[in-house]
Every structure is written in structure tokens, then in C-alpha cells.
Amino acid sequence: MSHPQIAIFARLANGNAAPVRAVAGQKALLARTTHGIAYDEVRDVFMIPNFYAHAIQVFRGDANGDVPPLRIIQGPKTQIKTPDKLMFDSVNNEIYVPQGNKLLVFDGSAQGDVAPRRILGPAQDLAATLVGIDPVHNLLVVAGNTGRAGGRFAIFDRTAAGDAKPKWVIQGPHADIRRLMGPIALVPHRGLIVAGIRTNEELGGDDNFVGVWDLFAKGDTPPLYRIGGPSVLLQQVRGVTLDPKHKELIVTDKRINAVLTYYFPEIF
Amino acid sequence: MCEWVPARATASFTAILQEQQAQARAKAPTPAQVSDVNRRKPVRMIKDHYGSYSSIAVDLTHDEVVMTDESLFNILTYNRTENTPPTATMSEPKRMIGGINTWIEFQCGVYVDQATGDIYAVNNDTVDRLVIFSRQAKGNVAPDRIIRTPHTTYGIAVDEPHQELFLTVQEAAAVSVYRKTAKEEEAPIRLLQGNKTQLADPHGIAVDSTKDLLFVSNFGSVSEHDRTAAPAGGEAREYTSLATKSNWPLARESAVPGTGQFLPASITVYPRNAQGDVAPIRVIQGPKTQLNWPTGLSVDPKRGELYVANDTGDSILVFSITASGDVPPVRVIKGAKSLVKSPTGVFYDGKHDEVWVSNFGNHTATVYKATASGDAAPLRVIRSAPLDTPTPNIGNAYAPAYDSKRDQILVPN
């Protein structure tokens, strides 16, 4: 990908729309494809991981152009290593950074070289790639891929730390969480997990879909809904996010190289 | 919709809420609902429906220009003298290579073999393959040759006298050097990597074979790598390759936690055959340089000048190849008339003394006299979209977020 940026589009943008603003440039300190982003509506900031510089960068919510981040979390005390994704808990003001065998949790106002507030793991089988937080039920969803067994949602207490074990796990051939890539989303009041699922084709395939799982289902439980599947547009789903006010699901797809918005009132 | 309430609320209140929430929880949908959702089409789709030129090279033998397109995943070939009239919708390419069989996706670098017309195109962070096509290839065809590369290769340069091929590797902050004729799983023959190199998110690369120099542009984000930091196992492809291939760069598994840094942008200069952890012989870096995400590079060996596609500077910077330190460019092409917008590729055509620019930000490739300066109008323009078509500039959008305060969608590339 030639040109890093954080493009910000109007909700109703469609087709060849130009972003209403974009953050890019030397001062912005972006690098590579940014695989994670979270918006905190309480403090009006958004944050991203920087894979190469082992950092979390926090920008003003209205950031535009070649502007520096408000804050950077970076340094040896942070234990941050090649951060790829992150998630923010607006209610409890915490930043979650999954790092494979451990999950780092920082104070949402952290800055500089600071230690995590708590760490889940290290545990060889944690498979922490993605995170969802349910502040209503006080739950933490650690999502990731576990080799041949495929993807998994492991549900912990929100404040789980150390060698805590998941309260339950959603995984199996019927659950069909084949491979998780981009950020997942939760609908806490409905007890739902929304995630993009890709197949193993390297470039893309017709079986990609966005699935919706019951957060409280345990074991090998199939998704309640799927958008996509054979020959229904999606080619290689990346991440999802939600717009509860307009009851919309927003999906990124690498192979289509697009951002798609679905009206999905059933999950809100 | 129920209002979200934090779990810090009192126990009794929480119990009431949880009862309400249990009632609100999704009931199993009916088969009709499931079917309806499954076939649902998006109500909106942000997508560039036109090609966005990312890298560029001229075939001087066959009088053609070759560009990679990161919007629609194609390699596009036009006549070198193509000039899209302002009233035309766009220029149609003479040949187009694209489709699932081609292994083409986010291609950031391109090289054309002047003797054969073969096209070498670098895939960045989704396909770890350098794909090589014959000049006449078109359509959804398999590459004639593939080299398996480290993850996140970006720029390409070829030293024809020594038959060597150079690739920058972003993630590893490295330069991998292959035999030009390498194929499949063949290992690199040299590696430039380490703290002394000052490589930091390297992008463009150029070789001056006449003076035996190697130039690399760097964005600045970097961390240390140490083989002992890698886990003793793992399934990641970099680690697997590390164990089996010589000269394979240390990558994410070997990154040392907490060692990340943000360095200023730079052009680092090395002897052509530099290898290992060696310091550059010169570094162009500092506020006078105007470097702002320096991307594609190209050398004019006769004048001894280095062209830099300066992405977020919306400019082409020209430095002497002997420049060092915080020095201003000798020339800058920049301004509204120049049409330079988010340039990511640049190519110096020594036969016609022209410089070509691929402008990722406005669907154009533009051509200038090599000595052009300031807000110079291009000699010719190749346009891939109707005039002034907006460019979303989306590339491998991975993680969307929703700004509920402004009703906006945040999309990082």
C-alpha cells in the first residue's frame, strides 16, 4: 500500500468520494498499513497502533492533515511489541493492545513510557489478536486464530489478568469462525459479537462473510446471521464497526478494496 | 435500543439491568430473516472505481510507460507519448494485466527490463511475491516468474551490470538483494539490516551503477531486531523463512519490545554492495530537505541527480547524488499547475531527458522536462479517470471506526 493515511469520510459517502479530511504526513508518524483504530466518543479522540515504532498514537477527534498525535505510548516499560490492533473501552477509559500470548491494558490517559495497568497472560494459548469489550456485562472477548482449530472467541471477565482462564469459548466447525482478520464489534445490550470471517484463499474468495454470534452461546454454536457467503459480493473481509444510531454495519474488504455499509437493524 | 450502562453500577441496579438486557438479547432469528440478511446488499460502498497510479517505469526500447494501479490491482501499459486530452474521459491502456491469476494487489514498485521489456512488480503487504511478466502479457495471466519475498517489500531497483535486484523491506527495515534471475524460493544473496544502517520504514530504492551507489528513502518508524528475541517456534512465515533461508531479514518475531522510535525522514546512501549492519556513507535528513514521506526514487547518472517522490509534500525533490546532511533540494516541482499530488513513484528517462511522476492522489501520471522547477506544467498527462474525479485513496483498508460525534467513518490505510 503506497500511501498511508487515516481518511475520514462522511457517513453517507459513496463511490468515488473524497474524504472530508485525512491525517497523513511526517508529523502524523503513521507507518505501514494501520490495522487497528478506535474512537472514544467520551473524550473525542481516536487512537491507532504503530507496528514499526512499537507505539500507540492518540489523535484529537477532529485531527486533519499532517498533525502530530496528542499523546504517544511508547518505551520499554510499555512492553509493546509490533502492535497490530487495539480496542478502547470508553466506559472504563482503558486501551487494550492484544499481542498474541498476552493482552496489555493501559489507562486511557496514558502517555510516554508507562507500564500497562494490567496484563492478561502471558499464556501460550491465548491467541490474542482482536478484542471486544462489553462494559454492560463486564466481559472481555479475546478473539484470535488457533491453528487448525480455526478462529475462536474466548470470553473473560473484563478485568481478567495474569493466568485467568476464559469463562467460556465459542469455537468449532459449526461456529465457523474460520479465520479472523480485522477488528470485531460487540452489541452489548443484545449480547452479540460481530466479526468478519475470511477463508484461506490468499487473495480472496466467495465464502467470506460477516457473522453475528450470540455472546452467551458456548462451544460450537453457529452464527445467528451471516452477510455474505458464496457469490454475495464480499471477497476478503477485514474489519467491522457499528453505527448504532443509524443501525448500520460498516465493513472493510481488502480484495474489493472498499468500505461497505449495510443497514442491519436486526442486531441493534 | 437499551442504553449502555457501565458494570460499575450498584449490584441491585445491575441485577435489574441484566434482567432487562436478557429480555433484549437476540432471540434466534427465523429462517426467513437469516436468508434475508444473508443476501443483503450494501447501501453504500466507498471505492475508487478508477485506477490510481502508484509506481512507474518507462520502457525506452518499446516507447511505452508501465504503471501499477493500487485501486483496481492492475499493471497498465500506455504509449510513452500518450497525452490524455482535457476533454477525454481517460486514456485507455494498451495492455492491462490484472486478475486473481496474476497475484497483483498493492503494488508499490515496478521495474522494466530495457532489454526484454519484462515487467517486475513488487507486491507490498498482502502478497509476499515479486511477480515478473513478459512485456506482451495481458489479462488475467499467471506471472512468468515469481520470487517469494519477505513480508512488506516496497521499492525495487535493478543493477544490470551486476545482474542484481534490490528490494526494500518495510517491516524488517532492511534491503534484500537477489540475483536478478532468481525464482520461487531462492534466498537473497545479501542483506542490509541493523541499527547502524539507519534504515527506518524504507520505501523507495535506486541504484547508480556508474558510481556504485545505493539510495534508500525512509519514512522513519523503526524498532530493533534481535534474533534472540524471536520465540523458539511459531508458525509465522517470517520465522519459518528465517530458519531455512540465508540472508533472510529479521522481522516481527525478532522485534525487541519497547525499542520503537520515530526518526526524521531520510535518504540513506550506501555503497552498492553494502551488506550486514553497516552505516550509510551519507544521510540526507533535516528540515531544509523538505522530506515528507519520501517514497519513489530515481537517479539521473549524467547530471548526478536524485529524484524523490515526496508523497505528503505533494512535490518532487531533486538532490545532488553527493548531497549530505540538512541540505535543501536543488530543484522542487510543486504547485497547482504541476498536478503533483501525493506522488509515490518517479522515473528518470535518460533517453528523452524527462522525469515521470505517478500521482497517487489525483488519477494522473505527469511528465516534465528533467530540469523543470517550481510550479511547472507537465509536458504530458495520462489520466485514468474523468477530470477532477475525487480520490478516496483507499488502500488495504483494514480497520474501520465510527465517529459518533461527527457521523463520520474513519478508515486507515
Image: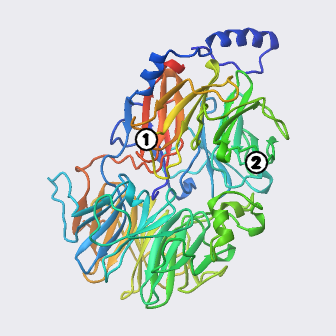
Q: Nearer the viewer, residue A240 or B248?
A: B248
Q: Is residue B106 above or below residue A125?
A: below
Q: Residue at x 58, y 40 (%)?
A: A178
The amino acid sitting under disc 2 is Asn
- In terms of sequence position, does the residue under pointer 1 or pointer 2 come before the other? 2
Left or right side of A104 for B37? left
Is A147 or A16 nearer to us in this picture? A147
Q: Does the rendering let one see residue B70?
A: no
Which residue is rendered at x = 57% and y = 77% of the image? Answer: B188
Can the viewer see residue A114?
yes
B394 in relation to B174, above or below: above
In terms of secondary structure, where does tag 2 sit? loop
Residue A22 rendering spot, x and y as whole percentages: 46, 46
The residue lying toward the viewer, choosing from A263 and B346, is A263
Kindly indicate the quadrant of the structure image that contains residue B8. top right
Coordinates of residue A105 in the picture (x, y in percent): 75, 41
Q: Which residue of the protein is positioned furthest toward the right in this rendering?
A: A163
Question: Which residue carries the number 1 mark?
Answer: A206
**Secondary structure under badge 1?**
loop
Q: Residue B308 — which label? A: none
Give the label on residue A101, or none.
2
10 Å neighbourhood of mark 2: few (<14), some, or many (≥20)?
Answer: some
